[in-house]
Image (cartoon, rainbow, N blue to C red):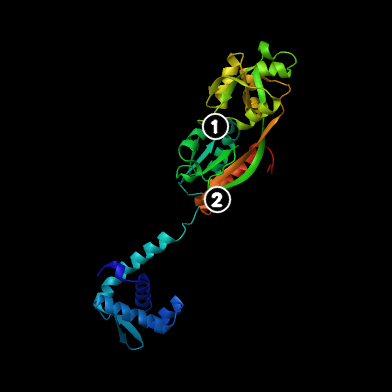
Amino acid sequence: MSLSQIDLNLLLVLDTVLSERSVVRAAQHLHVTPSAVSNSLARLRSLLGDPLVIRSGRGIVPTPHAASLAPALKHALSELESLVQKDHFDPMTTTKQFTLALADATTMARFPEIVKLVMKEMPCAQLRAVGIDTYVSSGGLSSMEIDAALIAREEKAPGAHMTPLYKESSVLAARRGNPHTSGRITKSRLAALQHVDVQVAPGRGYSELAQTYMRLGIDRRVAVTVPNFIAAAVVIAKTDLVATIPSTLMELLGERFGLRAIVGPLPKIVTQIKLVWHERTDNDPAMQAFREVVTRAVLKSLGKAEQR
């Protein structure tokens, strides 16, 4: 006889009967009628070829075969119950690894506060940060590699969940002393500038920036393309090129790299930074706690209680 021939509910009934030593008490425990328990026992007797339990006074006693089955049966059912139940999540003892995808500018501006809060509230957990290139190449949210992401672009993948956290503005920056950016920047002078473009992943440039120049009727001249905003800041610090970088990065690196913001006809570019995750982790207690920590840490890094 194979396991496929046995209804697992019958084994649960047998385990309860053997524990309670009473059909009536077993029925009460299982929230069924005594006759339902008796019918289940009858089916098992037929399948296993053994009486299983014998009446004795007001109760029942197991046959030798049933008594030999009892410990293994209880262990197996306990393992199955643990398997199907959600694990209790304790943030202070969890050793889970949480993976967060974010751009380099966000890493510099927001990640230290995330690290501090995770270390405080999940001291045994591991925190892993990956770039947007890894986010894209691994399949994004639907992969098993990424738990959540802080991104500017809209995430339209099936099963994506999203909550906006804050707005990030960008500035056109150049090195102090760049002869092409001194004085008043007119539309014609803006059109003549050569740019460092940032593509954080293959084929994924700063779409809002391209659209803004298009609306101005300017064909932006891209001289260099780099994979992150920090690289762009380093390049313009040493050349006469310009780059559009997040304001937070300008605040962090502008003085150190000798950069300045260029004021001109280019409208202010503002993007919404969102926390995104997948349906597969939406109800997971550990992931819910992690996202809550990330949200609070980001808002704390902004110096605001709420910035949605």
Alpha carbon separation for disc pair 2 and 1: 29 Å
The tag earlier along the polypeptide, 2 or 1, is 1
Q: Residues within 10 Å of mark 1 (few under 14, many from 20)?
A: some
Amino acid type assigned to the residue bearing label 1 in the image:
Arg
Considering depth in this image, is 293 or 177 the residue closer to the camera? 177
Q: Which residue is mark 1?
A: 204
- Residue 22 can be seen, yes or no: no
Give the secondary structure at mark 2: helix
- Quadrant of residue 34 in the image? bottom left
Position of residue 258 measured from the top left corner of the image (x, y, whole percent): 64, 17
Considering depth in this image, is 78 or 7 the residue closer to the camera? 7
Farthest front residue in view: 217
Q: Which residue is mark 2?
A: 288
| Left or right: 228 as drawn, with respect to 173 | left
| Left or right: 1 as drawn, with respect to 286 | left
Position of residue 84 measured from the top left corner of the image (x, y, whole percent): 43, 61
Callouts 2 and 1 close, C-beta under 8 Å: no
Position of residue 140 measured from the top left corner of the image (x, y, whole percent): 49, 41
Farthest bottom residue in view: 57
Position of residue 251 measured from the top left corner of the image (x, y, whole percent): 66, 26
Give the secondary structure at mark 1: loop
Q: Give the vertical position of 111 relative to 42 (above or below).
A: above
Considering depth in this image, is 134 or 186 the residue closer to the camera? 186
Residue at the (26%, 67%) spot, across then down:
2
Q: Residues within 10 Å of mark 2 (few under 14, many from 20)?
A: few
Q: Give the vertical position of 7 relative to 107 (above or below).
A: below
- Residue 43 can be seen, yes or no: yes
Amino acid type assigned to the residue bearing label 2 in the image:
Gln
- Quadrant of residue 305 in the image? top right
Residue at the (50%, 44%) spot, across then down:
141
